[in-house]
Amino acid sequence: MTQPLRIALAGLGTVGGGVVKLLEANRALIERRAGRPIAITAISARDRTRDRGVDLSGFAWVDDAATLATRDDVDVVVELIGGADGPALTLARATLAAGKAFVTANKAMIAHHGVELAEAAEKADAALKYEAAVAGGIPVIKGLREGAAANEIGHVYGILNGTCNYILTKMEQEGLDFADVLAEAQALGYAEADPSFDIDGVDAAHKLSILASLAFGTTLDFDSVAISGIRHVIAADIAEAQALGFRVRLVGLAEAGGGGLFQRVHACLVPISHPLAHVVGSLNAVVAEGNFVGRLFFEGRGAGEGPTASAVVADLIDIARGEYGPAFAMPVASLAHLPPAIPGERNGRAYLRFTVADRPGVLAEITAAMRDAGVSIESLIQRGAAADGGVLLVMVTHDCPESAVADALDRLKGSASILSQPMLMHILDI
């Protein structure tokens, strides 16, 4: 019988336990597809005594995960520890230095250190695989790296965080405010006790920077992603968007061109006619626009035990077959270095929400600031006074440079007529 692919598993949380279950449940099918057995030989986690609902007695237990890299009975190390640095990065470096394949679901580590690790993998002629790091079980990494490899990609964008999409969908369906839905999501386990990584857009930004590198053949540049989340979206924004023919979604968008590399994660208005408007609950979706293939749309479960374990094992099957290439679809030396694009040079429409004092002249003040900044207003809605005395004012602009909208908001800073920070959401027009 062909020699098995021997793997070590570092991290036995939800995903790690899922990998163990999947390899056992689909053992015969996986062996047929991989051309040989895939067998766990060693494991490592922080707590030996925790009941993980799987039988671990047949595996060698290692307290120091870094030592997995140098074991003679390990061909591939699977890292499911998490964190951009620390033990996960130490293990990644040690594994590739030892000439062994490395599989990870760690989007933060790839976003921050992916180029370094890809160079180490090339030097060692070893596989670096990370399908599970972006959009869980959706095969978007393989789709961009292999299926769309012949295409020039104009845009890559999508819904990259299931927690945010669950919250926005619930607000939309039930008319609830953000804080109420967040508390419910935490109670159900959809959101962490400290949800800031998700709701402030950082998780989605890690994934977007990886997708941008794959799509455009550019070096990773996480630090240049403009990031904002959904913390300040209110029920009224959801309702007004629906009335205007849109749905609110947290969208990561990347473009590359003569102006540089544009990367942004932000809450935006998605036209009801766009496929992303119909991605609901905790689902993820990624859209890539190729110059020959046209629009590619990937949708599915972006996190959780089953989908993420599925992506990890898919990478292991590729390695068992000997099918792997450069981590970012081309050698690191071939990746382009693009400067960050200037956001203000982009043109588009914008949604603006103001809470203003209920007195004469306020509307004229705001529209004058728009006029002086060169912003034309497409539609304007003014609601009656709320219990706190404020009035909700919502407008959608015509196409204009984003710098003009920023200029108009700057002109209104410090105005006694505006009672809280205005809400700006760009409109997805792709």
Image: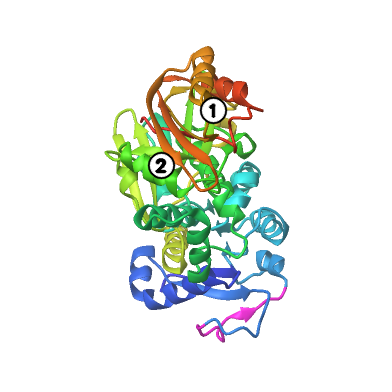
Tag in front: 1 or 2: 1
Q: Is residue 247 above or below residue 130?
A: above
Say left or right for 261 vs 35: right
- Mark 1 and mark 2 in contact? Answer it, CB < 8 Å: no
- Distance between mark 1 and mark 2 Cα atoms: 18 Å
Q: Is residue 391 magenta?
A: no
- Residue drawn at x 30%, y 43% is 275
Q: Nearer the viewer, residue 223 or 171?
A: 171
The stretch in magenta equals 53-63
Say left or right for 360 vs 169: right
Q: Is residue 72 above or below residue 148?
A: below
- Residue drawn at x 39%, y 64% is 34
Q: Is residue 62 above or below residue 218?
A: below
Q: Nearer the viewer, residue 209 or 368?
A: 368
| Quadrant housing the C terminus | top left
Looking at the image, tell me whether mark 1 or mark 2 is earlier in sequence order: 2
Q: Is residue 54 magenta?
A: yes
Q: What is the x, y in percent for residue 177?
A: 47, 54
For disc 2, the marked residue is 144
Q: Is residue 4 visible?
A: no
| Colour basis | rainbow
Q: Tag 1, which secondary structure?
A: strand
Q: What is the x, y in percent for residue 311?
A: 44, 60
- Residue drawn at x 33%, y 44% is 277
Looking at the rendered structure, the kind of residue marked 1 is Leu
- Residue drawn at x 60%, y 53% is 197
Looking at the rendered structure, the kind of residue marked 2 is Leu
Q: Tag 2, which secondary structure?
A: helix
Badge 1, how many Cα within 10 Å: few under 14, some, many 20+? many
Q: Nearer the viewer, residue 173 or 429?
A: 173
Dominant secondary structure of the residues highlighted in magenta in the image: loop
